[in-house]
Image: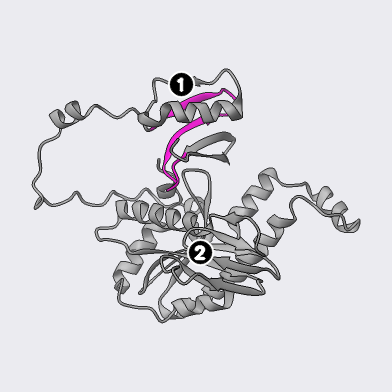
Amino acid sequence: MSELTLNTWKRHGKDRLYVNLPDGTAVAWADRATKVVTVKIQKYQDEALALLRKSLGDGVTIDSTRAGAAPSTSSAHARQPMTSPQSRPPGPAPLPPLSPSEDLARNSPGAGLIQMMAARGPSTVERWKAKLLRQPSDWDSWYTGLEGERRVGRELKRLSRLGWRVLHGIEKSNGGDIDHLLIGPGGVFCINTKTHRGASVWVGDTMTKINGGKPHPYAAASKSEAEYVRRVLGRYCPFEVPVEPVLVFVGVERLQRAATQYSVRIYQEREVASLGPLTGKLTPDQVESVYAAARHRRVWLRT
């Protein structure tokens, strides 16, 4: 198996299950209502179908009219002219029109969680009932996460005076979301916020342990998300966009980094200010170019 994962995506009246590679690339998706599957990368078809059948049961079918099967190597070469290494690469893709409803700059910190809670969370009556009766809720962790993202958002806002731009709650084509995207003279930082009140946290090269418990792939997921951001922005910018992954832990009692952990920046919420003085990666014009592309909601939903 290729470590494929299932991710739920609910937006605009659509309810889908996406099958993704570890780096976030979508290989197939299924409409929950019809159980019709669209295959985007043919070589993963059998694995993706097996995974979808476990979740959706029998009756899963392939939409052959939309399958994303790639042409064979021989036919692809027959249709594409040979290019030399010195050939100029194609220019950036044109940006779609930007309307207020598509502008991610309007998002507040925690926007992704707010949308998911509105779609799948408890009703207002249920929330007030649990609060009045002081009952624990399955959604408590969501509210905790929302407060963590808001706290990190406040810290990132302080960096605007140093030439940084920030976006929050960016929906991805695979159904997940990017908590925060920081764009400035020091490059682009893909920030994942984790809230663990009073916890002792250890972060290794790929895994994280909370209070010595079972490992979570926080670092590995952050690296995959940063690569996803680099690919998306690379479509629309006429220059290479440097992207780094960042893990920010909120409310923890103790944060320990492994000696070998150097591929992901690890901070507590008040430490993100150390990104502010970084320079030398993007010019002011490039910062605005990256920000102009990143704020378009639809560029992130392209599959």
Which residue bears the numbered disc 2? 204
- Residue, disc 1: 62
Within-10-Å neighbours for mark 2: few <14, some 14–19, many 20+:
many
**Percent of width and height locating residue 51:** 53, 31
Q: Secondary structure at mark 2?
A: loop
The reply to whether the C-beta atoms of the residues labelled 1 and 2 are less than 8 Å apart is no
Is residue 62 in view from this perspective? yes
User: Would residue 109 be seen by someone viewing this image from the given angle?
Assistant: no
Which corner quadrant holds the N terminus? top left
Other residues around mark 1 within 10 Å, as few (<14) / some (14–19) / many (≥20): some
Q: For the point 71% across and 71% down, which residue is it?
A: 198
Q: Residue at x 76, y 47 (%)?
A: 122
Q: Which residues are magenta?
A: 20-40
Report the Cα–Cα distance between label 1 and label 2: 40 Å
Q: Earlier in the sequence, mark 1 or mark 2?
A: 1
Left or right of 31? Residue 297 is left
Residue reaching furthest to the right: 133
- Residue at image location 85% in from the left, 53% down from the top: 130
Q: Position of residue 158 (x, y in %)?
A: 52, 78
Q: Count how many numbered circles sit on residues in the image.
A: 2
- Quarter of the figure with the C terminus: top left
Residue 65 percent coordinates (x, y): 39, 21
Q: Secondary structure at mark 1?
A: strand
Q: Is residue 79 magenta?
A: no
In this view, 124 is above or below 200:
above
Q: Which residue is painted at 44% across and 76% down in the image? A: 275
